[in-house]
Image: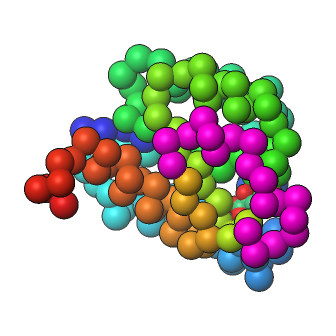
Amino acid sequence: MKTIRIINGPNLNLLGRREPTVYGNASFGEYLDTLRTRYPQCLIHYSQSNIEGELINMIHEAGFGNTYAGIILNAGAYTHTSIALYDAINAVETPVVEVHISNVHSREPFRHTSMISAACTGVILGFGTDSYRLAVEAILHADATETDI
Ligand code: DQA
């Protein structure tokens, strides 16, 4: 059974209450329940922090060894600023998929740049919270051959 780690960054603890027209009405806890129900074949561990250094510690902790098949990271606004997160993602062995709920490219110009994308295996954005599910699919199928797909 594959285990996947979701790490959410700043302000994502407010999902459901924060700018619902951009981020939706469901809390992340509610969304996580539906995601876990949909993927009984994998374990999904979740953590969130508003603090940059704690996110780095989480990436270090999840990023070595065979515990996790992949990390799904929504770094929130640190996406656009954090060289330290870029370094952390580069430092670890576990593949990291960058995720965003909103289409950052259709928003303010300061959201158009990601400091972390180049260190990530891939990027999924703009599909609402379904971006996380698509990232789960990407990790689950990462070792599939073309004939499996
Ligand atoms: C976000 C996009 C970021 O620009 C923003 O700062 C967030 C959420 C998203 O999921 O769409 O906090 O990462």
**Residue 142 x/y as whole percent:** 31, 45
Q: For the point 53% across and 64% down, which residue is it?
A: 131
Residue 92: horizontal and vertical position, in percent? 54, 22
Q: Quadrant of residue 39?
A: bottom left
Instruction: Check residue 27 for magenta coloring.
Output: no
Q: Nearer the viewer, residue 13 or 90?
A: 90
Q: What is the span of residues highlighted in magenta in the rendered image?
A: 105-122
**Magenta stretch holds residue 121:** yes
The residue at the point 21 percent across, 47 percent down is: 144
The quadrant in which the N terminus is found is top left
64 to 83, vertically: above or below: above
In terms of depth relative to the viewer, which is nearer, 71 or 47? Answer: 71
Please name whichever residue, 57 or 37, is drawn nearer the observer in this view of the structure.
57
Give the quadrant of residue 73.
top right
The reply to whether residue 82 is visible in this rendering is yes
Q: Position of residue 149 (x, y in %)?
A: 19, 60
